[in-house]
Image (cartoon, rainbow, N blue to C red):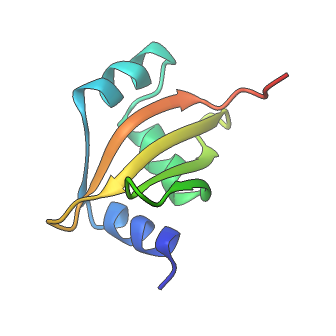
């Protein structure tokens, strides 16, 4: 299974959690946990930090806004969501 496939499977099974930082950052951009779930389930990995075992997943929130999520898979087999943000175009 691909890495994004594994992350999506864990999220579908409810095996994920948001850090306090991720929860605060999501709220700042008016996202909730359902937006985060949808973002991962609709998303793709854009960037990987191999040394840290982290992944940047970009997808869409429930309202269609682009959402970015940085996460990692823990040793206990859960997705730890580290931060969440609206994925605005750079320019």
Q: Which residue is depicted at the point 79% across and 26% down?
A: 90
Q: Which residue is depicted at the point 35% across and 54% down?
A: 72
Residue 63 pos. (x, y %):
62, 34
Along the line of sight, which residue is nearer the eye, 76 or 26?
Answer: 76
Residue farthest right in this picture:
91
Q: Which residue is depicted at the point 44% across and 42% down?
A: 36
Could you say which quadrant of the image residue 78 lies in?
A: bottom left
Q: In the figure, 51 relative to 90: above or below? A: below
Q: Which residue is depicted at the point 23% across and 60% down?
A: 74
Q: Is residue 30 visible?
A: yes
Residue 67 pos. (x, y %):
59, 37
Q: In the figure, 65 relative to 16: above or below? A: above
Residue farthest front in this picture:
51
Residue farthest left in this picture:
76
Q: Is residue 62 visible?
A: no
Q: Quadrant of the C terminus?
A: top right
Along the line of sight, which residue is nearer the eye, 17 or 47?
Answer: 47
Left of 46 or right of it: where is 75?
left
Number of callouts: 0
Along the line of sight, which residue is nearer the eye, 74 or 58?
Answer: 74
Could you say which quadrant of the image residue 82 lies in?
A: top left
Residue 50 pos. (x, y %):
46, 61
Residue 17 pos. (x, y %):
24, 46
Residue farthest top in this picture:
28
């Amino acid at each position: 299974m691909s890495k994004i496939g594994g992350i999506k499977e864990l999220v579908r099974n409810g095996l994920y959690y948001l850090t306090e930082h991720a929860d605060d950052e999501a709220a700042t951009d008016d996202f909730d946990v359902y937006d985060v779930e949808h973002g991962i389930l609709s998303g793709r990995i854009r960037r990987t930090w191999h040394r840290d075992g982290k992944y940047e997943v970009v997808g869409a929130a429930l309202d269609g806004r682009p959402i970015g999520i940085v996460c990692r898979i823990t040793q206990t087999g859960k997705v730890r969501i580290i931060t969440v943000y609206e994925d605005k175009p750079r320019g």
